[in-house]
Image (cartoon, rainbow, N blue to C red):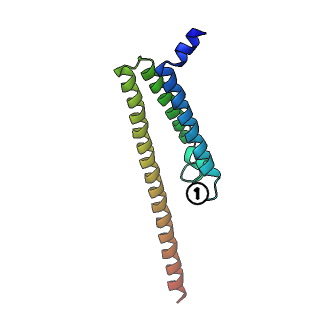
Amino acid sequence: MEFFFAHLLDPKFLWGIFSFITFLMGMIVLVRIHFSDTYRKFDLVKLIAIDDKGNLSDSKVRLNFAFIVTTWAFVYLTMSDHLTEWYVTVFLGAWVTDRIFARKDAHRTVMERTNTNIDIDQQELQDERSRRNVEGDAE
């Protein structure tokens, strides 16, 4: 029993309890804001899982899940005194790599949209020329 109370008063254990309670309180606040009438524009589901087009985004869900897991791992390694520069390098490298690929993907998507818009504009231009030729022939 004495071991239990000694472990209970360990600063690392208390810090873990405090962190968990803070996280839980933050989630409760976010859920209350999500369901409140005051903040109608705040949508927790859209924040976590829905992309700009309104579709369920697997990549956004994976990114948020990975962020939670890696942050927890980072804190755990720090609290257990096992954090080394290698973990920090891998942690930061993973997030920087993800952001680089996300920007590259976003750039590619913008380019595809631009090319699609150019194709549509060219089709509209050809339709307009055809219509003018038909009108010109009728006169």
Q: Is residue 110 something that shows in the picture?
A: yes
Specify few, some or many for label 1: CA neighbours under 10 Å numbering under 14, 14-19, or 20 or more. Answer: few
Q: Nearer the viewer, residue 129 or 72?
A: 72
Q: Nearer the viewer, residue 134 or 9?
A: 9
Q: Is residue 58 something that shows in the picture?
A: no
- Which residue appears at 58% of the width and 41% of the height? 27
Q: Is residue 73 above or below residue 133?
A: above
Q: How many marks?
A: 1
- The residue where tag 1 is placed is 39
Q: Nearer the viewer, residue 125 or 84?
A: 84
Left-right relation of 95 to 23 = left
Q: Quadrant of residue 4?
A: top right
Q: Is residue 56 above or below residue 115?
A: above
In the rendered image, residue 60, in percent from the top left (x then y), is placed at 54, 41
Badge 1 amino acid: Tyr
In the rendered image, residue 55, in percent from the top left (x then y), is placed at 60, 49
Q: Residue furthest left?
A: 85
Image quarter (top left, top right, bottom left or bottom right) of the N terminus: top right
| Mark 1 element type | loop
Q: Nearer the viewer, residue 107 or 25?
A: 25
Q: Residue furthest top?
A: 2
